[in-house]
Image: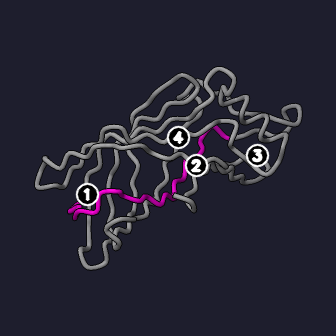
Amino acid sequence: MPGSTLAIAGFTNISHFVCFSSNESSLDAFQIDFGQQNNRILTFSGVELKISVFSIDCGNRLMNRDLQHSLGGRNFPYIEIQVLEATRISHNSQTGNGRARVLVDISMNGRSRKSYFMVEFNGSNPSEFSVIGSKKIKMTDFGITPPSPVMGLVKVNDEVSIQLNLIVKLQYLGQIEF
């Protein structure tokens, strides 16, 4: 939904940076299977965030170009995050707030890795909820050489953080107990 953000944050030898995706990735229909361990584990089919590498904006044209090139944008123009399952860790039924561990498959630069995101969610409205989480990754795990702009004087650290702040609207208005 509008208002959702996806960011890549990290450090260089000089400063901190945050780059935002300027495109919105909407989802078509997807399925949720509630059948495991008293609804504590949700299994997803068809939930994928697809972010254009060329939509990533760091607020600096040269930094955008270097990062987009490093992420392999010409050959692999999308970062894809596929949600596989979520396990509820805590949930307050009165406020709708809770925490979950979410298994995702992250694909970028032609490489894929499964990983867990710890997320907080607010589901007080049964048709709309927010999901906030972050995950540290190493660019080299995806075959990415961290950018080093300004003729190598600035060096981007290998570890960056993918930060999600998503607003999700459900078309199905039934009660989801998670």
Q: Which mark is residue 137?
A: 4
- Within 10 Å of disc 2 (Cα), the crowding (few <14, some 14-19, many 20+) is some
Cα distance between the residues tagged 1 and 2: 26 Å
Tell which circle, 4 or 3, labels the residue nearer the N-terminal end. 3
**CA neighbours of label 4 inside 10 A, class few (<14), some (14 to 19), many (20+):** some
**According to the image, what is the colour scheme of the structure?**
one colour
Read off the magenta span.
157-178
- Relative placement, left or right, of 49 versus 160 is left
Name the residue tied to disc 3: 13
Identify the image quadrant of residue 127: bottom left
Marks 2/3 in contact by CB < 8 Å: the verdict is no
Horizontal side, residue 123 vs residue 24: left or right: left
Q: Tell me what residue is drawn at x 54 percent, y 22 percent.
A: 110
The CA distance from mark 4 to mark 3 is 18 Å
Tag on residue 24?
A: 2
Q: Are marks 1 and 4 in contact (CB under 8 Å)?
A: no
Q: Position of residue 79 (x, y in %)?
A: 56, 35
Q: Secondary structure at mark 2?
A: loop
Point out residue 122 in the picture as x, y percentages from the top left corner.
Answer: 38, 68
At x 43%, y 40%, the residue is 48
